[in-house]
Amino acid sequence: MFFTSDRLRKLARGPAFLTVRSLHRLNPQIAGTRPESIARWLGFFERPEPAEIVANYLRGYFLFGRKTSKGDWFHWHTLPMRSVITRQWAHLNRNRRRQLRGAEFEFRYDQDLEQIMRLCQQGRDGWLTESVIEVYLRMQKLGLTTSLGAYREGQLVAGFWGL
């Protein structure tokens, strides 16, 4: 079978991301090194496509960003446990519902995703880079994200988002 460089790169990207991520974790200063050139060849500095994000999310991996001197690095992170909250399964006990009603919160679904992400980003230097925000906003346009914002007196005071 004949493989072009682009096809070979796409085939290698999936299995290689854990290896490259491990190399990066061992040596966070990879600028100008062989692991960086491999990461660039595999496309870890390129924005992932929505299909790749969804596929990796279903495998338990979350898209993270990291700023480097040569641009933003995209990598995949996994947690030992995940939590999936849907509208059907979300449940608050009676005391919590009473507290929320007394605080006069207004809840809005699927509005202000960018504002929620920007508030999550404030005061932190980490995984939620500008490039990652752009990726998730692009996914919002495709209808692949959801968010919940809590508002008090018209001001966003809390929220969360996900795929």
Image (spheres, rainbow, N blue to C red):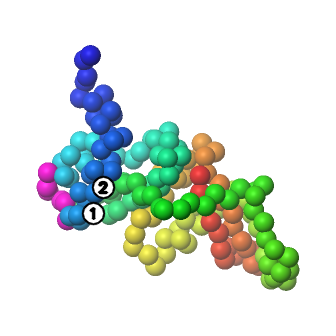
Q: Nearer the viewer, residue 115 or 78?
A: 78
What residue sits right under mark 2 in the picture? 21
Can you give x and y, in whole percent of width and height, for residue 153 in the image? 77, 79
125 shown above or below 69 = below
Residue at 60%, 42% in the rendered image? 142
Residue at 54%, 52% in the rendered image? 137
Q: Which residues are magenta?
A: 29-34
Residue at 71%, 56% in the rendered image? 86
Q: Is residue 50 visible?
A: no
Specify the quadrant of the image occupied by residue 93.
Answer: bottom right
Circle 2 residues within 10 Å: few <14, some 14–19, many ≥20 = some
- How many numbered discs, if any? 2
Element under disc 1: helix
Query: Mostly what secondary structure, the magenta segment?
Result: loop
Can you give x and y, in whole percent of width and height, for residue 55 in the image? 50, 42
In the rendered structure, are the residues bearing label 2 and label 1 in contact, judged by CB atoms less than 8 Å apart?
yes
Side (left or right) of 130 relative to 141: left
What residue sits right under mark 1 in the picture? 25
